Image (tube, coloured by chain):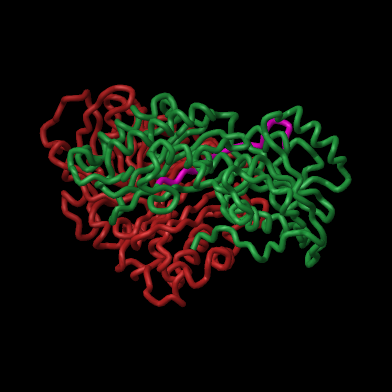
Chain colours: A red, B green
Amino acid sequence: MNPFTEKHGESVAALGETRLLEKIRLWLGDAAPAEPFGMGDDCAVLPRGKSARLITVDPVIYGGHFNDTMSPRATAQKLLKRNLSDLAAMGGVPIAAVLALTLDRRTSLRWLEGFYRELAACAHHYAVPIVGGDIAEAPQMHLSASLTLLGNPARGGRILTRRGAREGDAIYVTGELGNTLGTGHHYRFTPRLAEGAWLARQRAVHSMIDISDGLAKDLKALETGQQPLSAQIFPGRLPLRRGADLRSAVCGGEDYELIFSLSASARTADFERRWREAFPKTRLTRLGHFTQAGTREAGALNLEDYHGYEHL
Amino acid sequence: MNPFTEKHGESVAALGETRLLEKIRLWLGDAAPAEPFGMGDDCAVLPRGKSARLITVDPVIYGGHFNDTMSPRATAQKLLKRNLSDLAAMGGVPIAAVLALTLDRRTSLRWLEGFYRELAACAHHYAVPIVGGDIAEAPQMHLSASLTLLGNPARGGRILTRRGAREGDAIYVTGELGNTLGTGHHYRFTPRLAEGAWLARQRAVHSMIDISDGLAKDLKALETGQQPLSAQIFPGRLPLRRGADLRSAVCGGEDYELIFSLSASARTADFERRWREAFPKTRLTRLGHFTQAGTREAGALNLEDYHGYEHL
């Protein structure tokens, strides 16, 4: 749906800021907590005893992350869930979010209402109160929403970073890869919060990241940790999503699955059995392992031939 | 300075994302903490024991908050300080910030370098580590930066909201008002962090807000607290900034001064003496007082005749 309208009465400009804020409160419903915890002051106040240790920010921008073919509801889901996926990739659980909206004054109220109502539903589902935000005008048919998400490590879990992989670690990926645009997965996905929290409790898991820019690119981030490594990934093992080919699985991006590395000293069969008990519905695939940097084993993908999504 | 360039080699597109991120690390210097506390992972990790209870977000947008006449350095200062002013208005002290940058690929590196270097200097000055962020591309010569700031109540202070004003409270304002564009005050200002923290320790102070959209509009936010009130403001008392007239002082906005209300049972002379001892260089003006809603005393401004800045 095109988020802009040429009809003044259907645009945000017809309402003005104060009435738009009232509408947004209405659309958000109980996803927006009552004062002093929510909207309406210079800062939002977070509930005591739920202080944050993790923070992440990601936007959706018209013409990039969404366009006229995507509904406002899908756009809202994508915005919240891509931030949740970043939190899952550190083993975190969400606390609260703020939303900064930047919009052309011709933005249609119908689009905005769909967006906020679904944001509220999704925030409710994932227990993420929307505690505040900002609205600012931009020229030239610009529409973007930037969400900042706060979280904490899961109970009993540590904060799992990209930097702990070691030589010999096994490389795993959750779910399936590729064809995320063709299947609508790029907004229909479920962020791997439960899986991320569980993995952060396993001492044998050394490093973790979510796939937003494609396996090839995001895997490289795990190669440049405490010691320089090379990932040996065997193409026949890649769990392809419906309609996906190899290149789309390796380079496509927006998979929002977790890649993690498991200590060489861990028993993979035992680990995989415990995974299946914990997450019977979430596929887990061992793609390969890390070696010293500069190595390439027979049959392993040359990741230099594949590029993930570059933002510029 | 126009932030865009038609010369490919001088634009962010010539670098690509990875090298741009390296540049940004360089430009931020020690304003960006080392991992795991800073940039480079799915989430930033906040230092333990400094967990956040306050969160605020505000952007600067090309064509709105800045334009070709403003330097990238002034733009960076404005971005950080307008968020600090929101924190000051709750009696908070800063902990950390994340920055979401949205930019056309023609954005010039020279502009960006000036922006990030000054952001680093300003972050250093106010002890606000920039712990993470995001970069995303936007079409159509769009350039904006949205900063999310975390904070905590000041030591010994409470969180002071907009909602505590009572009938009979005196109304005070810090500094001077008006002509913020003509004097460059809209980016040269000093956020009232020390004053805000001090005020949050005074039990007789009932409510507080910073002036971003103009005295008339922001004062209205104090009128709609626990009980409906009317502000009686006497125009002769307004502390005018150089070159400011009454309308600019009441409606102009971007003053980033604090308005607060003081209990009717407090002795104003005693309070003002203690203020002068604490802040000999920060002017303090008693503008009037709050009455029951619907009242207008002789000589008081009719605030209905004045409108602050509406964002749409």
Q: Position of residue B151 (x, y in %)?
A: 59, 37
The quadrant in which the N terminus of chain A is found is: bottom left
Magenta-colored stretch includes residue B153: yes
Q: Give the prevailing secondary structure in the magenta stretch.
A: strand
From the viewer's perspective, is B303 left or right of B309? right
Q: Magenta region: which residues?
A: B145-157
**Residue at image location 60% in from the left, 29% down from the top:** B49
Residue placed most toward the observer, B303 or A143 = B303
* Res. B241 in view: yes
* Vertical order, B258 against B197 (above or below): below
* Vertical order, A228 against A272 (above or below): above
* Vertical order, B215 against B129 (above or below): below
Q: Position of residue A229 (x, y in %)?
A: 24, 26
* Vertical order, A262 against A278 (above or below): above
Write down the quadrant of residue B279 in the picture.
Answer: top right
Q: How many marks?
A: 0
* Res. A284 in view: no
Magenta-colored stretch includes residue B114: no
**Residue at image location 51% in from the left, 31% down from the top:** B128
Residue placed most toward the observer, B200 or A239 = B200
Q: Position of residue A212 (x, y in %)?
A: 31, 47
Residue placed most toward the observer, A136 or A59 = A136
From the viewer's perspective, is A197 left or right of A246? right
Q: Position of residue A16 (x, y in %)?
A: 53, 67
**Residue at image location 81% in from the left, 32% down from the top:** B273
The quadrant in which the C terminus of chain A is found is: top left
**Residue at image location 66% in from the left, 37% down from the top:** B153
